[in-house]
Image: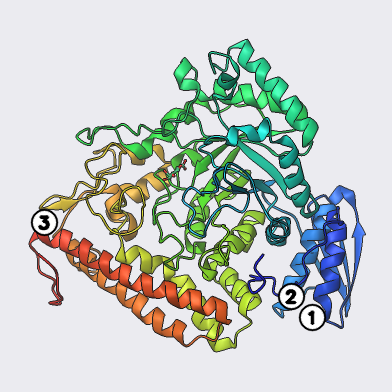
Amino acid sequence: MHHHFRYWLPFLPEGVPAELTTPAEVARFELAQALPRIAPEVTVDIILDEAMDEAFRIQRADDAVIITGGQRGVLYGAYRLMMNLAAGEKLPRSHFQQPRYALRMVNNWDNADGDIERGYSGRSLMFEGGRFDYDPVCLCDLARLMASVGLNVLCINNVNVRNPAHRLIEDWLPELAEVAAIFRPFGVKLMVSIDYAQPMRHGIDTADPLDERVQTWWNEQCRVVYAAIPDLAGFLVKADSEHRPGPFTYGRNHAEGANMLARALQPHGGKLVWRCFVYNCQQDWRDQVTDRPMAAYQHYVYLDGQFDDNVILQVKNGPFDFQVREPVSPTLLAMPKTNLAIEWQLAQEYTGHQIDIYAMMGMWQEVMADLGSDRIMAMAAVSNLGRDACIFGHPFAAVNMFGYGLLSWHPEFADPEGIARLWAKLTYGLEQADEDALVQILLESRSAYEKYTAPLGVCWMVTPHTHYGPSPDGYEYQTWGTYHRASRDAVGIDRTASGTGYAEQYPSELRNRYSSLETCPDNLLLWFHRLRYDYVMRDGRTLIQRIYDDHFEGCEWVEAAEQKLAALPLPEADKALVMERISRQKKNAREWRDVINSFFYRFSGVEDAKGRKLYL
Ligand code: GCU
């Protein structure tokens, strides 16, 4: 990896040598190079206790530390200790940790041609020109970054399996095995996205999951795959979604479709991760009955209890698609007899493309609070990594990968300020006042982005396809189920029982909270309700005035942030990137502000109460 960016591990200047093959060896190597830099007085012993697996205990008596755990446990414990020491945290005498979620996954959306779907930090670290093409040193550094925050699965290719990536589990097995070997010493297992219709590339005229020829093909294929990579984590599947093939073509439901693959993986210990991003992307905008966020619940909840044990349904955090603010997906609350994973998107597809500063911890905290931590057994996140000099595109976007690791290790570590502060301390080691300024910018960044983009949970005012920049009607008359229905008098969609009924998919507490105008949070008002522009908000402002105010405030925040960042003593390479990006963010935020405010001004004819400029 590019040497001036060590991200949150600047105390590890040497790459891990390729000869090391076990996590415990890596742990010893890393401690040996870090300790002289961060805590020369400390000595560390590692004791393996295989039964502890991923868990670890750190015991400290003065400057002598003992880390006990399974192979992966001692590695996680070693990184935890190094980060504690580097951040100057005081260690308790005995400290035990184990992960809350068994699978802590990063999903790359890398295509074999080197392009990354929704990737904003350059080309793929894995592929180029239709084949594997990677720098092993760089992948090793990536594996280290993942392990340092407890991430243990990397799905290496896009869920939209484009040519010729289907060959990953066929002709490219030797290369895949080589990549798996790079990640293995860090406790990271690979996963592969597969094409549901893959048997049809081999002379079978169907992909019907109940057809014996299809089953036999997958059984045999899994035998071959696992002979090459015995610890492959499994397959990830996007089926019947946005034109991807799937069981619906054959009149089968998604339990039938998923179980067929799960049974092929089962003898080898593999998992089948099945995405629930299924909706009608051919909707007529005139249709006011179909409501896209209701789709996943309708397709999956009735199947609760019918999925095999090694199937995990992967559900996006919100029922739409990674918008700046969404309520928790009701599907995640309605399938107690099914293994569930939540899917986040670290790539900022709808939230600024890693140009705009957008720290996600606040979103995680909100969603996890509504979810309750025992609903799910795994976490996944679409990655924000690429081949750019800074692999996260924006140096501050690293906080999202860092924090996501801590969150998926255990939500008890997902306190937004704690994450921001620890990341800032480790990455930059600033004076207290500078660190405070940076942490504050990170913590406020999401709300700022939300303010200058689409108002109060209305979503989808973004430029079609690229999903960057304002286009209030860009998705309004299209087939994607993405409407705000702004008119001369009102905006938003009634999703309560008197409207589409979406809110009825929630358990009573959330249903009531969202259905009543008294209790629905402001930032989701237009998600759940259709309101007139003269609707009076709780704070006494009209809806239209609130929309104007938010847009001006969001922009002012960016202007002020630019000033504060200019004063921060960041390392040169980071500083250059940060300043270049905030100047684009500022220009783009102004564009958002003026386009969205003008859009509503043109419809409503209402002037800004504070006399600021709106455009006709
Ligand atoms: C979004 C995104 C697509 C992606 C899809 C998915 O719609 O725009 O690029 O393929 O999500 O999650 O499958």
SS class, disc 1: helix
Mark 3, other Cα within 10 Å: few <14 / some 14–19 / many ≥20: some
Q: State whether residue 1 is above or below residue 322.
A: below
Q: Which residue reaches farthest front?
A: 129
SS class, disc 2: loop
Q: Earlier in the sequence, mark 2 or mark 1?
A: 2
Residue 536 visible (yes or no) = no
Residue 573 visible (yes or no) = yes
Residue identifier under label 3: 603
Residue 429: give x, y in percent of width and height: 64, 82
Q: Are marks 2 and 1 in contact (CB under 8 Å)?
A: yes
Residue 169 falls left or right of residue 196: right
Q: Residue 290 has which mark?
A: none
Q: Which residue type does callout 3 highlight?
A: Phe
Which of 394/433 is in front?
A: 394
SS class, disc 3: helix
As measured in the structure, the alpha-carbon distance from the residue carrying label 2 to the one carrying label 3 is 56 Å
Give the mark toward the camera: 3 or 1: 1
Q: Which residue type does callout 2 highlight?
A: Phe
Residue 485 falls left or right of residue 254: left
Q: State whether residue 102 is above or below residue 276.
A: below
Residue identifier under label 1: 37
As measured in the structure, the alpha-carbon distance from the residue carrying label 3 to the one carrying label 1 is 62 Å
Tell me which colouring the rendered structure shows: rainbow
Which of 177/554 is in front?
A: 177
Ligand 1, by image quadrant, is: top left
In the picture, the quarter occupied by the N terminus is bottom right
Residue identifier under label 2: 11
Mark 2, other Cα within 10 Å: few <14 / some 14–19 / many ≥20: many
Mark 1, other Cα within 10 Å: few <14 / some 14–19 / many ≥20: few
Q: In the picture, residue 358 is in which quadrant?
A: bottom left
